[in-house]
Image (tube, rainbow, N blue to C red):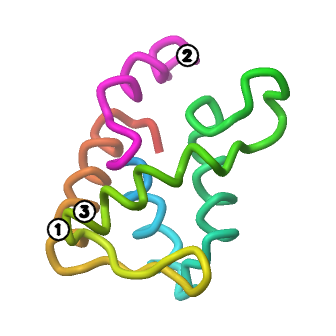
Amino acid sequence: MLNKNSKSLVFSKVSVNELILFCVHSVISNSEQCSFERLVKECFTLFPDTLRFARYPIWPDSRKLDRPLRALRNEKLIIGDPKTYFILTRTGEEKATAVSKSLRQGKLL
């Protein structure tokens, strides 16, 4: 079993963009629409150290998703915006699947 430091080390090798792709994939895989609020919940539940406020670690800082989401749209890995919901493009789905395999091989999820 990995301890918290081991998980942090592995997660530090995975970019925030990849974690977001994984979370969009996770929400959609559960037959849910991936609204911004649902995405924040998924990201904070799975990767709290990545998304928390520094001063208030029990709360998610949704601003940390803003630039990565724009970058993922520009890279054509996702479609959508915070006012509607997000979906993965074919390329985004492929990348999310690869991230999922990588995280699962590390037995982090």
- Identity, as a three-letter code, of the amino acid under mark 2: Asn
Q: Which residue is mark 2?
A: 3
Residue at x-position 59% and y-position 47%? 46
Query: Which residues, given as a range, are shown in magenta?
Result: 1-18
In the structure shown, which secondary structural element does the residue marked by tag 2 occupy? Answer: loop
Could you tell me the amino acid type at mark 3? Thr
Residue 6, image x, y percentages: 45, 15
Q: CA distance from mark 3 to mark 1?
A: 5 Å
Tell which tag, 1 or 2, sits nearer the viewer.
1
The reply to whether callout 1 and callout 2 are in contact (CB within 8 Å) is no
What element does badge 3 sit on? helix
Classed neighbour count for the residue bearing mark 2: other residues with Cα under 10 Å, few (<14), some (14–19), many (≥20): few
Q: Which amino acid, by three-letter code, is at mark 1?
A: Glu
Q: Which residue is mark 1?
A: 94
**What percent of the width, then of the height, locates residue 26?**
47, 67
Around disc 1, counting alpha carbons within 10 Å, would you say few (fewer than 14), some (14 to 19), or many (20 or more)? some
Q: Are marks 3 and 1 in contact (CB under 8 Å)?
A: yes
Where in the figure is residue 53, as x and y percent of width and height?
Answer: 74, 31
Residue at 58%, 52% (x, y): give it. 43
Of residues 108 and 76, the one nearer the viewer is 76
Tell me what residue is drawn at x 61 percent, y 82 percent. Answer: 83
Marking on residue 12:
none
